[in-house]
Amino acid sequence: MRVRLNLATKALETHRRFFAGAGLTVFVSGLVFLGLGWHVYSAREADAELRARTEKARQEMAKLETQRRELERYFSQKDVATLHDRAAFINTIIDARSFNWTQMFMDLEHILPGGVASCRHKNRVALR
């Protein structure tokens, strides 16, 4: 038979509470670590989708920029530029409405003699 004797000057202390607390702390820390890891993984997945959309938008922007340069090159040609300037001039005249066509024709109805309109109509028929 064995007899347990403690010959130390201090009594034997148990560290069970410390180890239980430390174990619980490690367990909770591990759960928090896994939770944060899952959050980082989810954020990276969402960021990957955003990066893909951003890259697609950049490619579209580059394509549109190329088309814009080609159109600028086309419209800077001399004959096209001349046509553009003429169209812009005509558009400004139309926009300004400096000449009221409706009023002019209404005045012509009152000013022209009665047979002029019928003669013009006969000329049109004869030309056809």
Image (cartoon, rainbow, N blue to C red):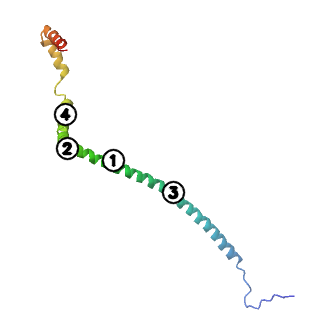
Rounded to the nearest angstrom, the CA distance separating label 3 from label 1 is 29 Å
Rounded to the nearest angstrom, the CA distance separating label 2 from label 1 is 20 Å
x 76%, y 91%: residue: 7
**Residue 77, disc:** 2
Rounded to the nearest angstrom, the CA distance separating label 4 from label 1 is 29 Å
**Residue 64, disc:** 1
The amino acid type found where label 1 is placed reads: Leu
Closer to viewer: mark 2 or mark 4: 2
Q: Earlier in the sequence, mark 2 or mark 4?
A: 2
Q: Earlier in the sequence, mark 3 or mark 2?
A: 3
**Residue 109, disc:** none
- In the picture, residue 124 is in which quadrant? top left
Contact between labelled residues 1 and 3, with CB atoms less than 8 Å apart:
no
Residue on which disc 4 sits: 92
Q: Residues within 10 Å of mark 3 (few under 14, many from 20)?
A: few
Q: Earlier in the sequence, mark 2 or mark 1?
A: 1
Q: Earlier in the sequence, mark 4 or mark 3?
A: 3
Give the SS element for disc 1: helix
The amino acid type found where label 4 is placed reads: Thr
x 19%, y 43%: residue: 77
Residue on which disc 3 sits: 45
Give residue 63's position: percent from left, percent from top. 34, 49
The amino acid type found where label 3 is placed reads: Glu
The amino acid type found where label 2 is placed reads: Gln
Closer to viewer: mark 4 or mark 1: 1
Rounded to the nearest angstrom, the CA distance separating label 2 from label 4 is 22 Å
- In the picture, residue 86 is in which quadrant? top left
Give the SS element for disc 3: helix
Contact between labelled residues 3 and 4, with CB atoms less than 8 Å apart:
no
